[in-house]
Amino acid sequence: MLSLLIFLPFLAALASLIFRQEDVSKWLSLAVAALTSLLSLGLWLGYDLAQGGFQYVQDIPWLSTLGINLNLAADGLSLPFLFLSALLTLIAILSEWQRKDGAIFSLFMLLEAALMGVFASLDLIIFFIAFELALIPMFFIIGVWGYDNRRYASLKFLLYSLVGSVFLLIGILSLGFLAGDGGVSFDYRQLLLTAPLIAKTPALLICLALSIAFLIKLPSVPFHTWLPHAHTQAPTGGSIMLAGLLLKMGGYGLIRFNVSLFPEAMQTLQPFFALLAVLSLLYGGMVALGQSDLKQLIAYSSVNHMGFVLLGIASLTAFGLHGAVYQMVAHGVITGLLFLLIGMLSHRTHTRSIAALKGMYTAMPILGGLMWLAMLGGAGIPGMAGFIGEFQAILGAFQNPSTSLWAVLGAFGILVNAALMLWTIQRVLQGEPSEQMKANYDLHDITSLELLSALPLILLALIWGFLPQSLSPYIDVGVQSALSQLGF
């Protein structure tokens, strides 16, 4: 089943490139994205919570002499991201449905295959290959189909990611040789047993190398500067995938590898992570307040939201790690919805200027109502999925004396984020549209296809907000290996 999730979209991408026909690419990509969404949902619902741990395990020999094999599995940590990878790919394809060039749909398929590999791999080299493969389609999606400054944004995205990849590869190779138990091994299950035996200094250096790679991807201040450019210049589908999934590779890697394999090194680096988390929370929110471009505002708010993820990880507590994962999943849904709706609005008005969009709720009540709901979700109000992740991340940081002071500072990030979203609601949604807006913009309300693409994200944001028990048990068993290494 996991092999299907990886290779079905990969083969669909190849077929689309071979046939080079618009209709073939579009409908094949749509069908495969829908099928993988159903498959991933089936895997999630079929997961045995009582048993926990890794399930659906596949061990396929490949380069065994080098310690590299196609080892795949899913647990409570990876299952939500596998499902989101398929669902958001489907929504991204629908958001770009009017495009005439079929190549972009092939790239979405390739990106989905890479993301499935990232979240399903138990071999660190396979993880690295999938991690790197995700850069290629996103680079072209931004660079070819983006806005005016797309080449600069795509190149900056690529360069930052490649710098992180160098550190990631050095860390993985060092880990495989030093914790290979008499040989070379990149099997995560074996490394869980042997990595804690590495001497303190090498373990700290490996943990630091992995941390740099994942902090760039998250992204955290001061490694965040590629994100606003990439989001602002990317097409709507690219922004959905970038916010919903590519950022999550960073947080997922920190929990899966750093916390689980190097608990002592993470305790040493704890003040460093907590400082970066608070800086991301406050800086991301404050800079977002000064933006005039709606898409760039949401991009900077993502830096704020990822600060909660990093603070939860830095706490090294059960509540904190749970909140970090919950926040990642919630952010993927809510911010993906925000970028989808902004894309619809931009298509109608041909602008993303906050000042020019004033009164959109009056002009387009259904689209405006959905935007209102999404922005309240971004503000982290109770009843939406984002509230639970933020609350648990802050609570987890309070529980650890080493991070309690940082939690107090981080709590101000909640106020900044709430002020940001409420002020944006006031500037964009409230008031009457100007005469210029009425005369020059095509203000028809949301279409059936657009509503269909937004509906799954709206429902998930509400379900995971009102019924956290539908997601929390999977996260609990997913972070269990990390918690056991920390002594919980």
Image: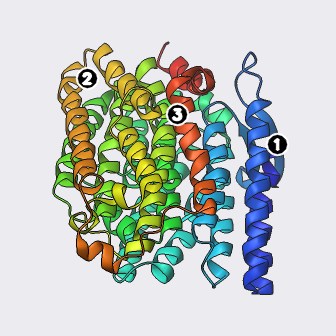
Residue occupied by mark 1: 58
Q: Secondary structure at mark 1?
A: strand
Q: Nearer the viewer, residue 14 or 193?
A: 14
Which dot marks residue 276? none
Amino acid type at circle 1 is: Gln
Residue 293 placed where, x, y %? 26, 65
Amino acid type at circle 3 is: Leu
Viewer-side label of 3, 2: 3
Tell me what residue is drawn at x 33 percent, y 19 percent: 395
Amino acid type at circle 2 is: Thr
Residue occupied by mark 2: 403
Could one spot residue 68 in this view of the protein?
Answer: yes
Tell me what residue is drawn at x 32 percent, y 73 percent: 438
Could one spot residue 265 in this view of the protein?
Answer: no
Residue 180 occupies which quadrant of the picture? top right
C-beta proximity under 8 Å, tags 1 and 3: no
Residue occupied by mark 3: 462
- Residue 161 is left or right of residue 220, and the answer is right
Q: Secondary structure at mark 2?
A: loop
